[in-house]
Amino acid sequence: MPPRDASVETIQRELTAFARRARATAARMHPELSLVSFTLLAHLEDRQGCRATDLAAHYLLDKSTVSRQIATLERLGLVERRLDPDDQRVQVLHLTDAGAATLAQVAASRLAAFHERLADWDEGDLARFAGYLLRYNAGYENAGYEPPAGR
């Protein structure tokens, strides 16, 4: 196998392992919420609210998937619907205080885990890795895909 192919295969395998660990970690942080749920909460916080159809379009998810996720978030008291002040026919999803607190707690836990995992990396390695991740995700954006979200 040519070296480039071997490297791409390794990257694919390791990113897949990373995604699996991320899902498992999300489940341990809040057993009732999936990684997708945390991603949606983060998006609602970043946008200060949005419609469910906007979430589906942004993350290229089926509307029924987003609907199920939002129903769970509402049942847990993390998200609420409010009428759009500009169009009373439209409902906008917003984090509740409990949703904001849960998201902040999870974000702090995830950041602490990254600090721990990367504690023995030197500044140069961290800077290069950060740059490579930015470059990789920019490739998704430049190709017209939405980058994977998450905090």
Image (tube, rainbow, N blue to C red):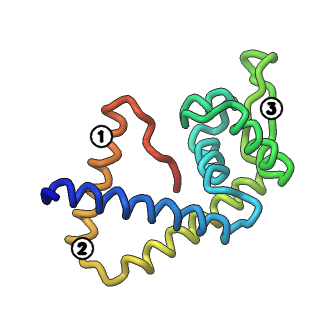
- Looking at the rendering, which quadrant does residue 120 occupy? bottom left
Label 3 close to label 2 by CB (< 8 Å)? no
Q: Is residue 120 above or below residue 81?
A: below
Q: Quadrant of the N terminus?
A: bottom left
**Residue at the (30%, 40%) spot, across then down:** 139
User: Residue 139: which numbered mark, if any?
Assistant: 1
**Residue at the (80%, 35%) spot, across then down:** 81
| Kind of element beneath mark 3 | strand
Q: Which residue is mark 3?
A: 82
Q: Is residue 122 above or below residue 106?
A: below
Q: Amino acid at mark 1?
A: Gly
Q: Nearer the viewer, mark 3 or mark 1?
A: 1
**Residue at the (55%, 37%) spot, across then down:** 59
Work out how far the residue at label 3 is from the one at label 2, CA to CA, in angstroms.
45 Å
Q: Is residue 34 above or below residue 83?
A: below
Q: Left or right: 12 with respect to 98? A: left
- Looking at the rendering, which quadrant does residue 34 occupy? bottom right
The answer to which of 99 and 38 lies nearer the viewer is 38
Q: Left or right: 131 with respect to 95? A: left
Of all residues shown, which one is farthest toward the right?
A: 75
The picture places residue 145, in percent across and down from the top left corner, at 41, 34
Work out how far the residue at label 2 is from the one at label 1, CA to CA, in angstroms.
24 Å
Precedes in sequence: disc 2 or disc 1: 2
Q: Residues within 10 Å of mark 2 (few under 14, many from 20)?
A: few
Q: Amino acid at mark 2?
A: Glu
Precedes in sequence: disc 3 or disc 1: 3
Q: Residues within 10 Å of mark 1 (few under 14, many from 20)?
A: some
Q: Which residue is mark 2?
A: 123
